[in-house]
Image (spheres, helix red, strand yellow):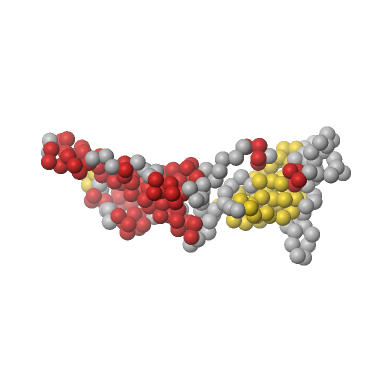
Amino acid sequence: MTYASVEDIYNYSGFEGSNFIAEGDRMGDDEWKDFLEDIILPTVDSFINRYCNVTSFNLHEVTELRRGKGHTDDELHSVHMTPREEDRIYLLREHPVHEVSLVKIDKGGVTGTPIWEVLEERSDSTPGSYIVVSNLDYKYLYFTRDLPLYGMNLLSITYTAGYPDGSQELDAIRIAAIRMALNMLLYKKKVQEATTIRAFATRDYSQMFAVHQEAYFLTEDVKIVLNRYRRPIHNPWAYE
Protein backbone atom coordinates (compact mmCIF):
# COMPACT_ATOMS: atom_id res chain seq x y z
CA MET A 1 0.00 0.00 0.00
CA THR A 2 1.44 3.35 -1.02
CA TYR A 3 1.59 6.25 1.45
CA ALA A 4 -0.83 8.33 -0.62
CA SER A 5 -3.79 7.13 -2.69
CA VAL A 6 -5.38 8.12 -5.99
CA GLU A 7 -8.27 9.61 -4.01
CA ASP A 8 -5.81 11.71 -1.98
CA ILE A 9 -4.35 13.20 -5.16
CA TYR A 10 -7.78 14.11 -6.49
CA ASN A 11 -8.98 15.56 -3.18
CA TYR A 12 -5.89 17.72 -2.67
CA SER A 13 -5.30 18.84 -6.26
CA GLY A 14 -8.53 18.48 -8.23
CA PHE A 15 -6.46 17.00 -11.06
CA GLU A 16 -8.04 14.35 -13.27
CA GLY A 17 -7.00 12.46 -16.35
CA SER A 18 -8.25 15.08 -18.79
CA ASN A 19 -5.67 17.52 -17.41
CA PHE A 20 -2.78 15.37 -18.67
CA ILE A 21 -1.56 14.01 -21.99
CA ALA A 22 -0.13 10.58 -22.75
CA GLU A 23 1.06 9.68 -26.25
CA GLY A 24 -0.58 12.80 -27.68
CA ASP A 25 -4.07 12.26 -26.23
CA ARG A 26 -5.82 13.28 -23.04
CA MET A 27 -5.79 10.54 -20.41
CA GLY A 28 -8.98 8.64 -19.72
CA ASP A 29 -10.06 7.75 -16.19
CA ASP A 30 -8.51 4.26 -16.26
CA GLU A 31 -5.28 5.49 -17.82
CA TRP A 32 -5.05 8.27 -15.21
CA LYS A 33 -5.60 5.80 -12.37
CA ASP A 34 -2.93 3.44 -13.76
CA PHE A 35 -0.53 6.36 -14.23
CA LEU A 36 -0.84 7.31 -10.57
CA GLU A 37 -0.82 3.77 -9.15
CA ASP A 38 1.96 2.37 -11.36
CA ILE A 39 4.30 5.36 -11.73
CA ILE A 40 3.71 8.43 -9.57
CA LEU A 41 2.79 6.93 -6.18
CA PRO A 42 5.39 4.10 -6.16
CA THR A 43 8.07 6.61 -7.22
CA VAL A 44 7.07 8.92 -4.36
CA ASP A 45 7.32 6.02 -1.89
CA SER A 46 10.75 5.12 -3.25
CA PHE A 47 12.00 8.71 -2.88
CA ILE A 48 10.68 8.95 0.68
CA ASN A 49 12.14 5.59 1.75
CA ARG A 50 15.57 6.39 0.32
CA TYR A 51 15.61 9.88 1.83
CA CYS A 52 14.62 8.52 5.25
CA ASN A 53 16.91 5.45 5.04
CA VAL A 54 14.09 2.98 5.73
CA THR A 55 12.59 -0.03 3.96
CA SER A 56 9.05 1.22 4.52
CA PHE A 57 7.03 3.19 7.06
CA ASN A 58 4.06 0.86 6.60
CA LEU A 59 3.92 -2.01 9.09
CA HIS A 60 5.93 -4.98 7.83
CA GLU A 61 7.50 -8.06 9.38
CA VAL A 62 11.27 -8.45 9.46
CA THR A 63 13.41 -11.46 10.37
CA GLU A 64 17.09 -10.78 10.95
CA LEU A 65 19.74 -13.49 11.14
CA ARG A 66 22.55 -11.96 13.15
CA ARG A 67 26.09 -12.81 14.08
CA GLY A 68 26.40 -13.83 17.70
CA LYS A 69 28.98 -11.73 19.56
CA GLY A 70 29.88 -14.31 22.17
CA HIS A 71 31.86 -12.73 24.99
CA THR A 72 34.48 -10.05 24.36
CA ASP A 73 38.11 -11.13 24.99
CA ASP A 74 37.05 -14.75 25.22
CA GLU A 75 39.18 -16.50 22.58
CA LEU A 76 37.21 -19.71 22.95
CA HIS A 77 33.89 -17.81 23.20
CA SER A 78 32.98 -19.80 26.27
CA VAL A 79 29.68 -19.25 28.04
CA HIS A 80 31.58 -19.16 31.33
CA MET A 81 33.17 -15.77 30.68
CA THR A 82 31.61 -12.60 32.09
CA PRO A 83 30.14 -10.59 29.19
CA ARG A 84 30.69 -6.89 28.72
CA GLU A 85 27.82 -4.48 28.18
CA GLU A 86 28.47 -4.29 24.42
CA ASP A 87 28.10 -8.09 24.23
CA ARG A 88 24.54 -7.82 25.54
CA ILE A 89 23.25 -5.17 23.11
CA TYR A 90 21.88 -5.86 19.60
CA LEU A 91 20.67 -2.82 17.67
CA LEU A 92 17.81 -3.63 15.28
CA ARG A 93 18.35 -2.60 11.65
CA GLU A 94 14.84 -1.50 10.70
CA HIS A 95 13.28 1.75 11.88
CA PRO A 96 10.93 2.37 13.55
CA VAL A 97 10.52 -0.89 15.50
CA HIS A 98 6.90 -1.47 16.45
CA GLU A 99 7.08 -4.80 18.29
CA VAL A 100 9.55 -7.67 18.79
CA SER A 101 7.68 -10.97 18.45
CA LEU A 102 10.29 -13.77 18.42
CA VAL A 103 13.92 -14.18 19.49
CA LYS A 104 15.82 -17.45 18.95
CA ILE A 105 19.43 -18.52 19.48
CA ASP A 106 21.26 -21.44 17.91
CA LYS A 107 22.91 -23.32 20.77
CA GLY A 108 24.60 -25.70 18.34
CA GLY A 109 27.18 -23.08 17.38
CA VAL A 110 28.76 -22.63 13.97
CA THR A 111 30.39 -26.07 13.99
CA GLY A 112 27.49 -28.11 15.35
CA THR A 113 24.03 -29.16 14.28
CA PRO A 114 21.60 -26.22 14.63
CA ILE A 115 19.69 -26.32 17.91
CA TRP A 116 17.32 -23.36 17.90
CA GLU A 117 15.87 -22.31 21.23
CA VAL A 118 13.11 -19.72 21.61
CA LEU A 119 13.87 -17.15 24.30
CA GLU A 120 11.36 -15.36 26.49
CA GLU A 121 11.32 -11.64 27.17
CA ARG A 122 11.85 -10.60 30.76
CA SER A 123 8.62 -9.59 32.50
CA ASP A 124 7.01 -9.37 35.92
CA SER A 125 6.17 -13.08 35.78
CA THR A 126 9.33 -14.55 34.21
CA PRO A 127 13.05 -13.75 34.41
CA GLY A 128 13.36 -14.22 30.65
CA SER A 129 16.58 -13.80 28.68
CA TYR A 130 16.30 -10.32 27.19
CA ILE A 131 14.50 -7.01 27.38
CA VAL A 132 13.49 -4.61 24.61
CA VAL A 133 14.94 -1.19 25.38
CA SER A 134 13.43 2.00 23.96
CA ASN A 135 15.79 4.94 23.57
CA LEU A 136 14.07 7.93 21.96
CA ASP A 137 12.76 6.54 18.63
CA TYR A 138 15.02 3.46 18.69
CA LYS A 139 14.67 0.00 20.19
CA TYR A 140 17.31 -2.63 20.78
CA LEU A 141 17.67 -6.00 22.48
CA TYR A 142 19.53 -6.22 25.77
CA PHE A 143 20.37 -9.78 26.81
CA THR A 144 20.23 -10.41 30.55
CA ARG A 145 21.34 -14.02 30.10
CA ASP A 146 21.57 -16.76 27.43
CA LEU A 147 23.75 -14.58 25.21
CA PRO A 148 24.16 -15.84 21.63
CA LEU A 149 27.33 -17.80 20.97
CA TYR A 150 30.02 -16.32 18.76
CA GLY A 151 29.49 -17.00 15.06
CA MET A 152 27.49 -16.16 11.96
CA ASN A 153 23.68 -16.50 11.93
CA LEU A 154 23.35 -17.77 15.49
CA LEU A 155 20.71 -15.23 16.48
CA SER A 156 17.28 -14.83 14.85
CA ILE A 157 15.09 -11.81 15.63
CA THR A 158 11.58 -11.40 14.23
CA TYR A 159 9.83 -8.07 14.69
CA THR A 160 7.37 -5.67 13.13
CA ALA A 161 8.68 -2.34 11.86
CA GLY A 162 6.82 0.75 10.71
CA TYR A 163 3.87 2.79 11.96
CA PRO A 164 0.33 1.43 12.34
CA ASP A 165 -2.51 2.69 10.14
CA GLY A 166 -4.14 5.78 11.54
CA SER A 167 -1.09 6.86 13.52
CA GLN A 168 -0.09 10.52 13.56
CA GLU A 169 3.30 9.62 12.12
CA LEU A 170 1.88 7.79 9.10
CA ASP A 171 -0.64 10.58 8.51
CA ALA A 172 2.21 13.13 8.42
CA ILE A 173 4.17 10.96 5.98
CA ARG A 174 1.03 10.66 3.83
CA ILE A 175 0.80 14.45 3.61
CA ALA A 176 4.47 14.61 2.57
CA ALA A 177 3.81 11.97 -0.09
CA ILE A 178 0.82 13.93 -1.44
CA ARG A 179 2.94 17.09 -1.70
CA MET A 180 5.69 15.25 -3.54
CA ALA A 181 3.20 13.65 -5.94
CA LEU A 182 1.72 17.08 -6.68
CA ASN A 183 5.22 18.41 -7.37
CA MET A 184 5.67 15.66 -9.97
CA LEU A 185 2.29 16.32 -11.56
CA LEU A 186 2.90 20.07 -11.69
CA TYR A 187 6.24 19.43 -13.34
CA LYS A 188 4.59 17.17 -15.95
CA LYS A 189 1.92 19.80 -16.56
CA LYS A 190 4.51 22.53 -17.10
CA VAL A 191 6.38 20.34 -19.58
CA GLN A 192 3.09 19.80 -21.44
CA GLU A 193 2.42 23.55 -21.51
CA ALA A 194 5.93 24.27 -22.75
CA THR A 195 5.58 21.68 -25.49
CA THR A 196 2.21 23.10 -26.56
CA ILE A 197 3.50 26.67 -26.62
CA ARG A 198 6.53 25.73 -28.69
CA ALA A 199 4.32 23.82 -31.11
CA PHE A 200 1.98 26.79 -31.65
CA ALA A 201 4.57 29.57 -31.21
CA THR A 202 2.36 31.34 -28.70
CA ARG A 203 4.55 33.85 -26.92
CA ASP A 204 1.71 35.34 -24.85
CA TYR A 205 1.68 32.31 -22.57
CA SER A 206 5.39 32.25 -21.77
CA GLN A 207 4.73 32.96 -18.07
CA MET A 208 2.74 29.75 -17.70
CA PHE A 209 5.78 27.49 -17.56
CA ALA A 210 8.39 29.57 -15.75
CA VAL A 211 10.44 27.22 -13.61
CA HIS A 212 9.22 27.35 -10.00
CA GLN A 213 10.01 25.26 -6.95
CA GLU A 214 7.33 22.75 -7.94
CA ALA A 215 9.76 21.38 -10.50
CA TYR A 216 11.84 19.91 -7.69
CA PHE A 217 10.08 16.92 -6.21
CA LEU A 218 11.72 16.72 -2.79
CA THR A 219 11.06 20.33 -1.79
CA GLU A 220 11.96 21.93 1.53
CA ASP A 221 8.41 21.74 2.87
CA VAL A 222 8.46 17.99 2.24
CA LYS A 223 11.87 17.61 3.88
CA ILE A 224 10.70 19.47 6.99
CA VAL A 225 8.07 16.79 7.55
CA LEU A 226 10.29 13.83 6.67
CA ASN A 227 13.27 14.98 8.73
CA ARG A 228 11.32 14.06 11.88
CA TYR A 229 11.25 10.42 10.77
CA ARG A 230 14.64 9.98 9.10
CA ARG A 231 16.79 7.09 10.29
CA PRO A 232 20.35 8.28 10.94
CA ILE A 233 23.02 6.38 9.05
CA HIS A 234 25.09 4.37 11.52
CA ASN A 235 28.38 2.60 11.07
CA PRO A 236 27.44 -0.89 9.75
CA TRP A 237 29.46 -2.41 12.59
CA ALA A 238 26.91 -0.99 15.03
CA TYR A 239 24.58 -3.78 13.90
CA GLU A 240 27.14 -6.51 14.53
Residue 72 sits above or below residue 5 on the image: above
Q: Toward the viewer: 237 or 61? A: 237
Q: Toward the viewer: 155 or 129? A: 129
Left or right, residue 24 beside residue 34 = left
The residue drawn where x is 66% and y is 46% is 91
- The reply to whether residue 137 is visible in this rendering is yes
The residue drawn where x is 74% and y is 62% is 123
- The reply to whether residue 39 is visible in this rendering is no
Res 9 quadrant in image: bottom left
The spot of residue 163 in percent (x, y) is 53, 56
The residue drawn where x is 78% and y is 62% is 126
Tell me how many marks there are.
0
The residue drawn where x is 37% and y is 51% is 179
Residue found at the far bottom of this picture = 125
Res 7 quadrant in image: bottom left
The spot of residue 31 in percent (x, y) is 30, 49
The spot of residue 20 in percent (x, y) is 25, 47
Res 8 quadrant in image: bottom left
Quadrant, the C terminus: top right
Left or right, residue 85 beside residue 168 = right
The spot of residue 111 in percent (x, y) is 80, 36
